[in-house]
Amino acid sequence: RVAAEAERTNMAVSLVAPIGAGGVRFRRARRPAHRVTPGARKVPGDERSPNVARLVRTPVPGVGLGRSRACVARDAPREADEPRDVRVEASAAPVRSPSWDEADELEQVGGAGVPSRSSDEYVRKARSGVAGLQPSSTVCEDMYCTDPGLNQLLISEGSSISRFFSQDEWERHRSVGRYWRHLFSTWKSTIFLRVLEPVLLITCFAAALAAWNTHFARVLAMPVLQIAPLAHQLSGGIVSLSLVFRTNNSNRRVIDARSLLGKMSKCTRDLTRMSQYVPNQDGLRLDVLKHLRAFPYAMESHVRKGRSREDARDPTAFRVDPVPGMTRALGTKKAQRLAYYENIPAQVLLDMSQILNKALSLGMSTQMHQQCEIIVKELSSVVSESEKILYTPIPISYTRHTSRTLTLWLLTLPFSLWGALGLATIPAIFMLGWLMLGVDEIGIEIEEPFCILPVRPLCDMCEREVVGAMAQALRAEDWLPAAKK
């Protein structure tokens, strides 16, 4: 039945995880879609969204496919010896929702005649062009399975800001052994891998300068290339101020984004508690809770609109589809209607205000209605302030000037160090380049924080809290204002 549906819609069925089913890979259609993989079977025990068909590939005799398995819930049966790449599987979706443009096509990774490549290969290639110096693994599978919208190119293995910390992780985070653990895992660091290429180029320039000063200058009877260190001593403070200013501004954006996500969680709890003052007539109270349950997923799709890649098979390309999450809350018809709007969370809040206005006409207290509207207004401010972070980076001219200044400073630094360090200039330049370019890279990575913060786990937490309090809120008696004497 699923295969027939895939052929009818001229689309390819790919793998999808029950956790984070809203994540999909996409590209512009250039050729007919492939047929569904033979031997596909449905994952049991997950019927949350009628819009999403969850498939797992199984080996079929005569078909040259490796064994692959989707990211399944912890209580679902799984074979321990099956190799898998959940970063490929969790970022795919088998159906096209109305939120997609008609020209967008979902496609299985690696078509006919095209060898399939794992997500690790793309991540290693994009992080650094230096071969042989890449870690064997990139992103923690459980973390990416929980939040497939994370940007794999910016997330390190192990402890990360991109997931909720448990008490055990906090203990590990502040343990005294962190110094040695961090030191010996430097080669796995995302920052190290991303700046490795420019650092090596600058180091090679220093090595060329050392070769000239030690050999070619003597053979050709040319002067040794070196300058007084005073120039770099005077300009070092300017370079440091530029790096500190940029990194502090980027860190402020992360703090603001975390505050906005926390504010969304707070408003969700407050409005869930205040919903008992909404009249229970015509299902108004239930409608408020349903829209409140759908809002976090609409918000996630708004701050993670998608990222494209030059290679259409690159599994790190990603776009959040809010329809599966909103379907669980509102049903298929309403979720598809909301998906057509450009600003989905704003439309969800507009529908919520209309429900509250109708409740006011049915006898809801004016004071309680005002308090609920204040919470809706705070949710609207979360949307607008998130757009400010998402759409407006730190001034580009400042970023360019900092990069140019830092690069020129490091390229000319060997001339200043040669007289004092000699051949030790080469490792010194490598260390200084890694330290200073790493600070600049940190500021670049955290400038757009929504791709590294745990947005999906927070949305799931908000949904669980709304669903958990829904029964008690619906059983509450209607609250009517006291009669005036």
Image (cartoon, rainbow, N blue to C red):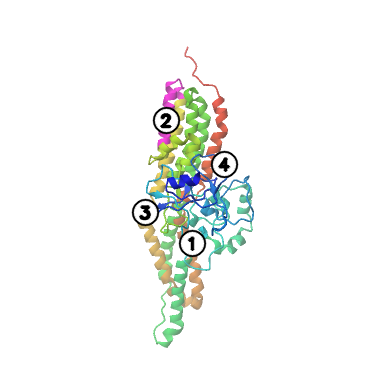
* Of callouts 1 and 4, the N-terminal one: 4
**Mark nearer the viewer, 1 or 4:** 1
Q: Main secondary structure of the magenta part?
A: helix
Circle 4 Cα neighbour tier, 10 Å, few/some/many (<14 / 14–19 / ≥20): some
Please name the amino acid that badge 3 sits on: Pro
Q: Position of residue 291 (x, y in %)?
A: 47, 34
For disc 3, the marked residue is: 395
- The residue at the point 42 percent across, 87 percent down is 219
Residues 467 and 10: in front is: 10
* Of callouts 4 and 2, the N-terminal one: 4
Q: Which mark is residue 115?
A: 1
* Of callouts 4 and 3, the N-terminal one: 4
**Mark 4 and mark 2: span between their CA atoms?**
33 Å
**Mark 2 and mark 1: span between their CA atoms?**
51 Å
Is 360 colored magenta in this rendering?
A: yes
Asked if labels 4 and 1 touch by Cβ distance under 8 angstroms, the answer is: no
**Mark 3 and mark 2: span between their CA atoms?**
36 Å
* Of callouts 2 and 1, the N-terminal one: 1
Please name the amino acid that badge 4 sits on: Asp
Circle 2 Cα neighbour tier, 10 Å, few/some/many (<14 / 14–19 / ≥20): some
- The residue at the point 41 percent across, 50 percent down is 105
Circle 1 Cα neighbour tier, 10 Å, few/some/many (<14 / 14–19 / ≥20): few
**Mark nearer the viewer, 4 or 2:** 4
Mark 4: which secondary structure? loop
Above or below for 192 versus 417: above
Q: Position of residue 152 (x, y in %)?
A: 50, 55
Asked if labels 2 and 4 touch by Cβ distance under 8 angstroms, the answer is: no
Please name the amino acid that badge 2 sits on: Ser
Q: Position of residue 397 (x, y in %)?
A: 35, 57
For disc 2, the marked residue is: 353
Per the rendered image, the range of residues in magenta is 347-367
Residues 315 and 172: in front is: 315
